[in-house]
Amino acid sequence: MSQRFKILSEIRDIETIASGRGVYIRRQLERVYGRGRWRKMKGIAIVELADGTICEAEIHWYEAHGIGRRDFKIKRVIR
């Protein structure tokens, strides 16, 4: 369900899914964005989809200290 979207609210209920060696695409992230302590995260936010629909969705992303949040993806639409 990965597509273009805009996050309209703050991300809430943030959880770490994986960190360190548990992040399977760590090498790719380091090649594109640089070395860091990469973590895969998830949270809930209100998003606007490419077709203009506004809904609440569970989103996943990767983040590292000093690099920030990268590669956002919608995993499921809640309502």
Image (tube, helix red, strand yellow):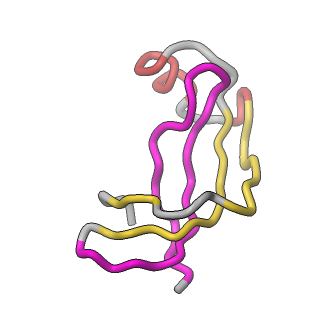
- Taking the spot 68% from the left edge, 35% from the top edge, the residue there is 39
**Residue 7 at what x, y percent from top left?**
46, 59
Identify the residue at the far bottom of this view: 79
Task: Relative to 57, say whether 21 is above or below.
Answer: above
- Taking the spot 67% from the left edge, 23% from the top edge, the residue there is 65
Question: 10 or 35: which is nearer to us?
Answer: 10
Question: Residue 13's image quarter?
Answer: bottom right
Question: Residue 31's image quarter?
Answer: top left
- Taking the spot 38% from the left edge, 59% from the top edge, the residue there is 6
Question: 27 or 41: which is nearer to us?
Answer: 41
**Residue 36 at what x, y percent from top left?**
63, 17
Q: Main secondary structure of the magenta part?
A: strand
Task: Relative to 57, say whether 43 is above or below.
Answer: above
- Taking the spot 54% from the left edge, 63% from the top edge, the residue there is 9
**Residue 46 at what x, y percent from top left?**
52, 70
Question: Residue 63's image quarter?
Answer: top right
Q: Quadrant of the N terminus?
A: bottom left
Task: Relative to 52, say whether 6 is above or below.
Answer: above
Task: Relative to 22, say whether 64 is above or below.
Answer: above
Answer left or right for 30 relative to 66: left
Reply yes or no: does residue 76 show up in magenta: yes
**Which residues fall within the magenta stretch?**
51-78
